[in-house]
Every structure is written in structure tokens, then in C-alpha cells.
């Protein structure tokens, strides 16, 4: 099992019991390896205090399970307004908003797309780029995130972004703010 998938499997049950949804686990960096955990509450919010609470819980689990044998920095954050799109549900939730999507293999002769999410059909993401509708197999998406646009910012400020689990056609990196729909981050100060 891939390291990030193993870590997600280790921490997700505890996060769920604490009232948080796991958004993403990422590990990388050669000089200063960092384990990044993105999480949020079911209403889409995440305060600095929430990040600290998740950080303490994740640290305790990883200290016992020890999936990473070298030193690393633990970083816990909200997904932020220009959040990564990790699940099919994310594309449904943020339909109508602009996203940057990169596929692992070319689809219709290209790997990079920047356009409006137009929905999900089966296991395919529909994205409109310059008036052309592309059908991207979810299994081929390597990286995807929302683009910070005026309409995304406006929806966030109005509290109009749909919370996780809401199948809506409308549209949430890390600093120390703690408002609904805002960004929050806490980084452990010690190396693991």
C-alpha cells in the first residue's frame, strides 16, 4: 500500500470520530520531508484550533504506528478556497467554478486543462475550456484544484460555498484565519 494511502487509512477513522473529514494526505520533500494533512469540518470550516486538535491526534497515531521511519515535519491545514479536488464528489460540489486539472496521460491530445467544471457523468469529469467541453476520466486525473477567481471569492465571502457532501452546482492554502469557508493552518514545530 502506498505510504499516503496507508497514513490516510490510519488517521481517517479517528478524524471522523472527532468530527473532521480528511481531504488529502501528501508526503514529500527531499531536504525537509513534510507530511501534509488537509481536513475540514462537515460544514466546510476549519479553525486554527481545529488544525491544532487534528495535529495532536495525528501525531499520537503516527507516533504509535510509525509509518514514516525518517524525520519529517507534520503540517495540518484546511483545504483553503483554492482547494484541491480529490474525489468525484468535489467536482459535483464545485460544478460551475473554474479549475486547473492535469491528467497523468494525455486526453484528446493534452494533459493540462483550465476551465469551468460542468459536471460529472459516471466516472468522467466534464470541463469546459474555451467553449469546448472535455470528458476527463477521473482515473486519469493526477492533480486538480480550484482556481482563485472573483466568483469563487465572492461565494466564499457570502458563505455560499456548498459544504462537503452537498451535491450542488456551486462552489473552499493555508494561513492563520479562521472564518467559515476561510483558510486555517497549524504546523507542528518539531521534527518527527
Image (cartoon, rainbow, N blue to C red):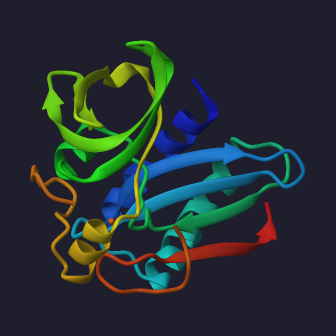
Q: Which quadrant of the figure contains the C terminus? A: bottom right
Horizontal side, residue 173 vs residue 115: left or right:
right
Horizontally, residue 4 falls left or right of residue 156, namely right
Taking the image as drawn, is residue 44 in sight? no
Question: Residue 118, percent across and down?
Answer: 17, 39
Q: Position of residue 184 (x, y in %)?
A: 48, 77
Q: Nearer the viewer, residue 102 or 129?
A: 129
Position of 104 relative to 30 (above/below): above
Q: In which quarter of the image is residue 89?
A: top left
Q: In this view, does 55 lie above or below 140?
A: below
Q: Is residue 8 left or right of residue 153?
A: right
Residue under the image location 42 percent in, 82 percent down: 47
- Percent of width and height locating residue 180: 29, 81
Which residue is painted at 49% across and 24% down in the image? Answer: 111
Quadrant of residue 80 in the image? bottom left
Whether residue 91 appears in this view of the structure is: yes
Name the residue rendered at 21%, 60% in the picture: 171
13 and 181: which is toward the camera: 181
Number of dots carrying numbers? 0
Q: Residue reaching furthest front?
A: 130
Percent across and percent down for residue 188 are 69, 73
Amino acid at each position: 500500500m502506498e505510504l499516503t494511502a496507508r497514513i490516510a487509512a490510519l488517521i481517517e477513522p479517528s478524524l471522523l470520530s472527532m468530527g473532521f473529514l480528511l481531504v488529502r494526505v501528501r508526503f514529500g520533500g527531499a531536504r525537509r520531508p513534510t507530511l501534509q494533512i488537509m481536513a475540514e469540518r462537515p460544514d466546510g470550516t476549519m479553525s486554527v484550533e481545529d488544525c491544532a486538535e487534528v495535529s495532536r491526534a495525528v501525531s499520537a497515531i503516527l507516533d504509535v504506528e510509525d509509518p514514516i521511519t525518517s524525520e519529517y515535519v507534520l503540517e495540518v491545514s484546511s483545504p483553503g478556497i483554492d482547494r484541491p479536488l480529490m474525489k468525484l464528489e468535489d467536482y459535483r460540489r464545485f460544478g460551475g467554478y473554474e479549475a486547473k486539472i492535469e491528467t497523468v496521460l494525455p486526453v484528446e491530445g493534452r494533459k493540462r486543462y483550465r476551465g469551468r467544471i460542468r459536471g460529472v457523468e459516471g466516472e468522467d469529469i466534464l470541463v469546459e475550456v474555451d467553449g469546448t467541453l472535455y470528458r476527463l476520466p477521473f482515473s486519469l486525473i493526477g492533480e486538480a484544484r480550484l482556481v482563485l477567481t472573483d466568483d469563487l471569492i465572492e461565494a466564499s465571502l457570502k458563505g455560499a460555498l456548498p459544504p462537503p457532501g452537498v451535491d450542488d452546482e456551486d462552489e473552499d492554502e493555508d494561513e492563520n484565519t479562521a472564518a467559515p469557508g476561510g483558510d486555517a493552518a497549524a504546523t507542528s514545530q518539531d521534527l518527527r
